[in-house]
Image (cartoon, rainbow, N blue to C red):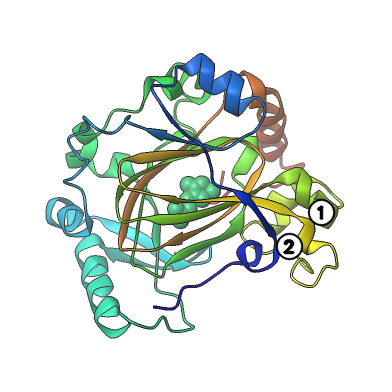
Amino acid sequence: MSRRKGVIERRCRLLGDIPRRRGLTARELQAEYLKPRLPVVLQGCMDHWPGFGKWNLDYVAEVHGDVEVNVGRLFHIERKMTLRDYVDYVAGWRREHDDVLPDELPLYADGCMVSTLPKLADDFQIPACFTELDWFERFLPRHPLGQGYLLLGPKGSMTKLHIDGHYSHAWVAQFAGRKRWNIVPFDALKGFFPGGYFDYIAEWEGIDPPGLEEHPGVEEIGYHSTVLEPGEIIVAPSGQFHEVYNLDDSVALSSNFLERSNARKAAWSLLLARTGIRRAKPRYGPF
Ligand SMILES: O=C(O)CCC(=O)C(=O)O
Ligand SMILES: [Fe+2]
């Protein structure tokens, strides 16, 4: 089956896989990965979650079929559908496009706040290495970026190159299916954004940097890549561009967090957005 490849995977230089760690403490995560801004895959955190091995598209539709979710492509919300209708849509799309992916992307339900799905609430426990560090929970418990989101999509759905809002760190826990993750640090691409990070999230979120594809130095830009397997959690620290492809029908849970090493920049970013001086457009809505 043909597979889509984003601008990073097509044009940049693969540096290697993303390391896997088991039993990492909050302090180790902070010192070895968050502070130096290095991605990592955590293994073993989901082994005892009741939802791991149980959550898949059919299960979500079975327990919360009537809940309406936004669906769209490439960060543009196109409409609302019930989870039952969305899962039917996915099955239909997969029947039609099992072997060869069409140019058109399938609809992706990638912003479904998990708090709207109470029957899933007891099926996971956010790992202590995040909760012990997280400042959203402590200072902005209702901020949308700190909430958990379910990402549901068929094989062939994707998230275009982007960076997460307000200098936040992101984690994504994979329940079903696999995802290809390609990651490049902001510094490697900052030449494309004369206004810096804030301009990117304000103006360019989800859009491949203009000119990157044809840029003469593009082959020198290094990226890390991995296939995230069910039961694994990837951590993308603040300022990491990522493009993500669902290699199978996929169910994942994602959230963002702040801690000592990104909180100061995040606080400025949140403040500027709040005052309207700079208008950030992080991916999950108007905040
Ligand atoms: O899994 C995906 O499609 C993208 C996830 C992502 O970019 C995130 O949660 O920050
Ligand atoms: Fe992201």
Vertically, is 247 above or below 97? above
Look at 44% across and 67% down and name the residue there: 72
- The picture quadrant where one finds residue 161 is bottom right
Does residue 269 appear anywhere in the picture?
A: yes
| Labelled pair 2, 1 in contact (Cβ < 8 Å) | yes
Question: Of residues 60 and 82, which is closer to you in this image?
Answer: 60
The residue beneath circle 2 is 209
Does residue 285 appear anywhere in the picture?
A: no
Vertically, is 239 above or below 77? above
Vertically, is 65 above or below 278? below
Q: Classify the position of the C terminus by image quarter.
A: top right
Question: Of residues 67 and 29, which is closer to you in this image?
Answer: 29
Give me the C-alpha separation between circle 2 and circle 1.
Answer: 8 Å
Say the numbered circle drawn on residue 193.
1
Residue lying furthest front in this view?
16
Cβ of mark 2 under 8 A from ligand 2 = no
For numbered disc 1, what is the local secondary structure? loop
